[in-house]
Amino acid sequence: MAHVTFEQVTKQFGDYVAVKNLNLNIEDGEFLVFVGPSGCGKTTCLRLLAGLESITEGQICIGDRRVNELPPKDRDIAMVFQSYALYPHMSVFENMAFSLELQGKSRAAIKQRVYGAAEQLGIEKLLKRKPKELSGGQRQRVAVGRAIVREPAVFLMDEPLSNLDAKLRVQARKEISKLHQELKTTFIYVTHDQVEAMTMGDRIVVMKDGILQQVDTPTNLYNNPINMFVAGFIGSPAMNFFEVEKVEQEGNTYLQLGQNLISLEQYLPQLQDAIGTRPLTLGIRPENIYHPQYLPPDIQGLNIRAEVNLIEMMGNELIVYLETPDGAEFVARLDPRAKVTSGETLDLLFDAQRLYLFDREMETVI
Ligand SMILES: Nc1ncnc2c1ncn2[C@@H]1O[C@H](COP(=O)(O)OP(=O)(O)O)[C@@H](O)[C@H]1O
Ligand SMILES: [Mg+2]
């Protein structure tokens, strides 16, 4: 078990900055997820920690030990790669035993650990098989098993579920979470999938272009994103954004969204002073938009008129694509009982308590 710290860590490949000035404390036993779009530097962060890439600037500590100069094998970590990287000519048992043999462990100790891990993962019956005789899900478990037998202080996992089909991915996700609960070891997990991040992470690091945007619990990231990137990345369908203008009328201040006026005093009083004169973007999540006939009693709805472009009936919800009279497009997740037809004009209700306001140029939350 160990905590991990990144202190002002930068990684350059030639002139290209893949990770920029990363500061991060990962607690002992925590399940931390790195999430972000492809190419944002997630894998590089793991490889720096694993010792598979050199650190350009800054330092990484595992426990209280600086590991910058420590070779990978001495870092007390185990990594599960996206490709699994199983040895094709070795049996499952041999794949799992390999690193222990390198460590010079006794046959009895190796057997005990491999059988223990195999039992934990439900792959006892597969130990004699070769990787090519396994399904994708079974290979994924073997890759995890190979990491478990080493009893590392920190587990690193790089998109370990991306080769599985959707249903298997949901199951494997639960298995990895359960494994973390049992082992109580530090897990650092990389994914581009915000659903995986939200469901598995104690905390989530959101990255963009090599820069940490925000690190927080799933709930706080969802409720209090610090900028438009995080707001748009966490949640599906993504948060809607509208360019709005601040207008004064008869001594009151409003945000103008197309033909609609949103009273600042009434709906966003806490932001009145902070707004100033900068250009603004308003954000609202699709799930905070309601059909007028299905507005929960405790929600204060802001009326917004829009035309229905497209409807996706999901069974449990209606995903409706809409457009305001002045051409702003947005998405709503409506009650599946709502009768909605394509081309019709609706007076939808935005939950006034769930509006976000951003500085349009800086893209930061106000
Ligand atoms: N060995 C390398 N040489 C040059 N560029 C690299 C190397 N490894 C990664 N990169 C670049 O660094 C950026 C971040 O890569 P990576 O960490 O793999 O992203 P992610 O895992 O988030 O998709 C990418 O633009 C990638 O092309
Ligand atoms: Mg990657």
Image (spheres, rainbow, N blue to C red):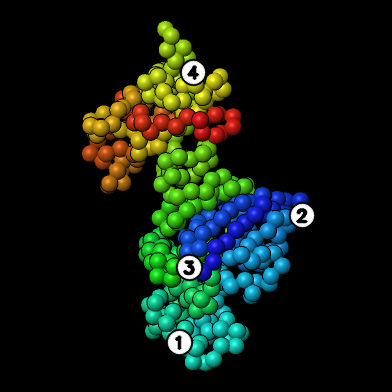
Q: In this view, does 355 lie to the left or right of 21?
A: left
Residue identified by numbered label 4? 246
Residue identifier under label 3: 185
Vertical relation: 338 (above or below) 93: above
Who's the residue at 40% across and 19% down the image? Answer: 265
Q: Foreground residue, 227 or 281?
A: 227
At 53% from the left edge and 51% from the top edge, which residue is drawn?
A: 205
What's the amino acid at mark 4?
Answer: Lys
Residue placed most toward the observer, 180 or 210: 180
Q: Name the residue under label 1.
A: 112
Mark found first going from the N terminus, 3 or 2? 2
Which one is earlier in the sequence, the residue at label 1 or at label 4? 1
Q: Distance between the residues labelled 3 and 1?
A: 20 Å
Residue holding disc 2: 14
For the residues bearing labels 3 and 1, Cβ distance under 8 angstroms? no
- Determine the CA span between mark 2 and mark 4: 46 Å
Q: Check if mark 3's residue and mark 2's residue have beta carbons within 8 Å.
A: no
How much space separates mark 3 and mark 2, taking CA atoms? 35 Å
Q: Say which amino acid is labelled 2.
A: Gly
In the rendering, at what x and y percent does residue 234 appear? Answer: 46, 45
Q: Can residue 11 be seen in this view?
A: no
Nearest-to-viewer mark from 1 and 4? 1
Residue that extends furthest to the front in the rendered view of this protein: 64
Q: Earlier in the sequence, mark 2 or mark 4?
A: 2
Please rate how many residues cluster around mark 4, counting C-alpha atoms within 10 Å: few if below 14, some from 14 to 19, many from 20: some
Q: Which residue is drawn at 36% across and 31% down?
A: 353
Q: Distance between the residues labelled 1 and 4?
A: 69 Å
**Circle 2 sits in a helix, a strand or a loop, which is it?**
loop
Give how far apart the Cα atoms at labels 4 and 3 are. 50 Å
